[in-house]
Image (cartoon, rainbow, N blue to C red):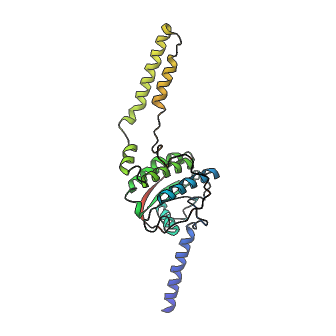
Amino acid sequence: MKKVLLSLLAVILLAAYTSAQDIPARPNPPKLVNDLAGVMSASQVQYLESKLRHFHDTTSNQIVVLTVNSLNGYDKADFAYRVGEQWHVGQKKFDNGMVLLVKPKHGNRDHGQAYIAVGYGLEPVIPDAIARRIVDNEMIPYFKNNNYFKGIDKATTILMEMAAGEISAKGYNKATEGSPWTAVLPFVIFIIIFLLIRGSNAKRYSMGHSGTSFWTAMMLGSMLGGSSGFGGGSSFGGGSFGGGGGGFSGFGGGSFGGGGAGGSW
């Protein structure tokens, strides 16, 4: 009986050790941006690292970005939660950590995967439905074009704004939800362009080339050149955050309980 118990204990310990080995080790020295899949340039990684360090220094919230080439058999949600737990992302008192996980798409062999795991303390301000919308709206459209940096940059900006209270889940949801005008807007713009060009051509005989085409272009630029992005005016959404040289103090022991969502492409 004793041998059976010892054998069972050995199997359990081996399984736990193997599971830990399947998850990337916590970086030493600690880093917030860990591009293990190599989908970003060194300057892009440095920019994101400085951005997320600045956010941590000013709010105590922590966002870890991790890209990997394989999930080692795990579901993307399970993988992201294990990273959050084993790396102790966030502060122990507040559980205010997030893990932004990306597994790139490799040709036609498999699907790309993305997931945002949210610590206990941030679940009220970043609900699962909003995490899913951020993945779908801010990340995957860029990932489909292999622009991983842009998708990660936009997603982290939104997450930072929400965690800091600059925008609410309701506000983001309202700003990004579909509108009945979306389907007809291109047709309306086409009609306006047609009428402007037609009017411009009709006046050429009496006005010559007096700049009508210039004002037409200005009006079209005003209609078509507006920004549809979200979060451009935030204190976290752009600009310089320094060179990233100051040391990151490390992870504080945060916990994760299943909050978050993801998607694939």
Residue 133 appears at what percent x and percent y? 42, 50
Residue 162 appears at what percent x and percent y? 42, 52
Marks counted in the figure total 0
Residue at the (43%, 54%) spot, across then down: 164
Residue 182 appears at what percent x and percent y? 39, 36
Residue 166 appears at what percent x and percent y? 41, 50
Is 175 or 237 nearer to us in this picture? 237
Relative to 47, residue 82 above or below: below
Residue at the (57%, 71%) spot, across then down: 21
Relative to 181, residue 86 above or below: below
Residue at the (59%, 65%) spot, across then down: 27
Q: Can residue 39 be seen in this view?
A: no
Left or right: where does residue 28 sit relative to residue 12? right
Residue lying at the far right in this picture: please name it: 42
Residue at the (43%, 59%) spot, across then down: 260
Relative to 58, residue 215 above or below: above
Residue lying at the far bottom in this picture: please name it: 1
Left or right: where does residue 257 sit relative to residue 101? left
Is 212 or 35 nearer to us in this picture? 212
Q: Can residue 184 be seen in this view?
A: yes
